[in-house]
Image: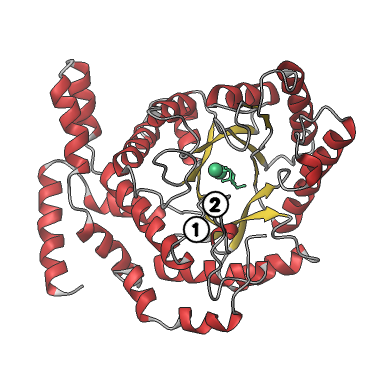
């Protein structure tokens, strides 16, 4: 590192040593944090009002992998890519897997799409028409078959199913139809696979959504069994929801399977994670790190098995830089959470020292972790500033030949 970084790191290490924090251990855990990027985050996407098409976005799933490989090459933190079916349907998933592997990537979670065909206007697995429920369930089963070819472990389920008006549909019958589809799909999973059930409190259903909150997803997962867990999308909660409380509860119940990271101000805005409320992201990681140190092995295992996935729609910002920024924001808040002295915190909590416990958390959040991030990247032979490294490079100009017209789907 340059002399400034060296001096900053030396001061940082001394500051942390004096607080009982082992910076070497912190850096090891920070290096071990792997973040899955979404194939759909590289293609054109937008809002229901407009998709602003960008020059050079991928024209096919293979090119999405090439863009994802750039993010991984510059950050060292993104070795897997989630795919979305049929947006990422290819004739030969074995060849697709080999293409990803040739780029230093693996194919991660498989996301079925049962929300974009006309048949699904009034619901997919909860549709009153048994023909449509069958069609949707068959798609879920087909995605399990894709997982067998891509070597994926996680089936990541989100349903747009919901209604717009009171009385439109029978909510309890829909609950049973949903569970039937989940059960049939769950029974098709191989022993190493997981089903991650995602919830969302509204949109596109504006009156009710069949999987509207963590409790419904938790209950559905519990009815299925140990290979079903909950996926927390950080943008899927009503205003003011305490997301880190949900995370703590699901961790303690062994049912936190993963995240879809993004930021929200008002709705499911799919903004760059950590850009609106970085303290929430820090507090989520603090709960995970607390669970990682828990005396209960099951809680520790749940924390260790979390899939950290980004799910964002970069409507106005350039795709690859937005993904790099997202990864940097995740690493920054995780690094800060690693600086919480858990013994100091537990001691203050045990003494009902309100301000002491709050301070034990907040002061870690207020610390500058840039020397640690620089050291971690330097030790891996990575650019200390991955964003600047991308901007200084020529990848953006090289992919311009793709023209305009690529899309997420
Ligand atoms: C939309 C949904 C949900 C889902 C994602 C990918 O709100 O978050 O996980 O699309 O299918 O953002
Ligand atoms: Mn999501
Ligand atoms: Mn969403």
Instruction: Indicate left or right for 254 with 97 as reference.
Output: left
**Could you tell me which secondary element the residue under label 2 belongs to?**
loop
Residue 320 lies, in percent from the top left, at 46, 67
**Could you tell me which secondary element the residue under label 1 belongs to?**
loop
Q: Are marks 1 and 2 in contact (CB under 8 Å)?
A: yes
Q: Which of the 4 image quadrants contains residue 40?
A: bottom right
Residue 13 lies, in percent from the top left, at 15, 54
Category of crowding for the residue at label 2, using alpha-carbon neighbours closer than 10 angstroms: few (below 14), some (14–19), many (at least 20): few
In depth, the one of 71 and 31 nearer the eye is 71
Q: Where's the N terminus, which quadrant?
A: bottom left
What is the count of numbered marks? 2
Residue 164 lies, in percent from the top left, at 65, 29
Q: Where's the C terminus, which quadrant?
A: bottom right
Image quarter for ligand 2 equals top right
Identify residue for label 1.
315
In depth, the one of 235 and 386 nearer the eye is 235
Identify residue for label 2.
47
């Amino acid at each position: 590192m340059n002399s400034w970084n060296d001096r900053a790191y030396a001061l940082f290490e001394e500051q942390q040593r004096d607080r009982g924090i082992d910076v070497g251990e912190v850096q090891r855990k920070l290096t071990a944090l792997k973040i899955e990027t979404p194939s759909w985050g590289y293609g054109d996407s937008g809002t229901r009002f407009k998709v602003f098409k960008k020059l050079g976005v991928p024209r096919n799933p293979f090119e999405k992998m090439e863009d994802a490989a750039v993010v991984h090459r510059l950050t060292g933190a993104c070795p897997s890519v989630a795919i979305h079916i049929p947006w990422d349907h290819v004739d030969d998933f074995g060849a697709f897997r080999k293409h990803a592997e040739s780029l230093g990537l693996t194919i991660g979670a498989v996301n079925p799409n049962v929300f974009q065909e006309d048949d699904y206007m009034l619901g997919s697995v909860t549709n009153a028409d048994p023909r449509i429920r069958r069609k949707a369930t068959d798609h879920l089963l087909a995605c399990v078959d894709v997982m067998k070819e891509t070597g994926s472990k996680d089936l990541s389920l989100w349903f747009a199913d919901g209604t717009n008006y009171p009385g439109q549909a029978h909510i309890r019958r829909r609950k049973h139809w949903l569970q039937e589809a989940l059960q049939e799909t769950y029974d098709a999973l191989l022993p190493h696979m997981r089903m991650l059930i995602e919830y969302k409190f509204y949109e596109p259903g504006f009156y009710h959504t069949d999987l509207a909150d963590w409790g419904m997803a938790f209950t559905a997962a519990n009815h299925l069994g140990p290979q079903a867990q909950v996926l927390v999308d950080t943008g899927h909660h009503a205003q003011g929801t305490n997301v880190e409380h949900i995370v703590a509860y699901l961790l303690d119940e062994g049912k936190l399977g993963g995240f879809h990271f993004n930021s929200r101000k008002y709705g499911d805005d799919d903004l760059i994670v950590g850009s609106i409320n970085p303290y929430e992201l820090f507090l989520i990681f603090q709960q995970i790190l607390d669970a990682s140190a828990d005396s209960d092995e099951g809680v520790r295992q749940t924390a260790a098995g979390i899939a950290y996935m980004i799910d964002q729609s970069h409507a106005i910002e350039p795709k690859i830089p937005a993904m790099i920024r997202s990864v940097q924001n995740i690493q920054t808040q995780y690094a800060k959470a690693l600086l919480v002295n858990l013994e100091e915190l537990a001691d203050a909590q045990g003494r009902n020292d309100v301000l002491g416990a709050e301070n034990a958390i907040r002061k870690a959040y207020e610390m500058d972790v840039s020397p640690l991030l620089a050291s971690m990247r330097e030790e891996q032979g990575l650019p200390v500033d991955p964003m600047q490294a991308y901007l200084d490079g020529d990848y953006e100009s090289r992919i311009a030949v793709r023209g305009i017209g690529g899309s997420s789907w």
